[in-house]
Image (cartoon, helix red, strand yellow):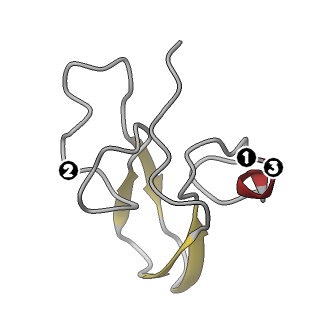
Amino acid sequence: MADPTIAQKEPYAVEVKAGKSYFWCACGKSARQPFCDGSHKDTEFEPLKWDCDKDGKKFFCGCKMTKGEPFCDGTHNKI
């Protein structure tokens, strides 16, 4: 499997809304980070759907190397 493009070496802080679905960019190529804009076409990557059940702030992974997809787990500190 190919490595994703590192969009940024820190998480994206996003205010999320309950009842909404979010599609996290896994390839790192989206211009709408941290969310998918379809740039993964012609790659082996697919966006990850996450359904929000509570309003609040979430920290979406920006380096695309997290083990806790779609959220930051601190992996960016090691790359």
Alpha-carbon neighbours of circle 1 within 10 Å: few (<14), some, or many (≥20)? few
- In this view, 40 is above or below 21: above
Question: What residue is rendered at 60% in x and 60% in y?
Answer: 9
Residue that label 2 marks: 37
In space, the residues marked 1 and 3 are separated at their CA atoms by: 4 Å
Residue that label 3 marks: 78
In space, the residues marked 1 and 2 are separated at their CA atoms by: 25 Å
Residue 68 shown left or right of residue 18 in the figure: right
The kind of residue on which mark 2 rests is Asp
Q: Which one is nearer the viewer's eye here, 44 or 16?
A: 44
- Label 3 SS: helix
Depth-wise, is mark 1 or mark 2 nearer the camera? 1
- Residues tagged 1 and 3 counted as in contact (Cβ below 8 A): yes
Question: What residue is rendered at 76% in x and 57% in y?
Answer: 73
Q: Position of residue 17 (x, y in %)?
A: 41, 81
Depth-wise, is mark 2 or mark 3 nearer the camera? 3
Residue that label 1 marks: 79
Residue sitting at the far top: 1
Question: What residue is rendered at 44% in x and 53% in y?
Answer: 7
- Residues tagged 1 and 2 counted as in contact (Cβ below 8 A): no
**Of the residues under marks 1 and 2, which one precedes in the sequence?**
2
The kind of residue on which mark 1 rests is Ile
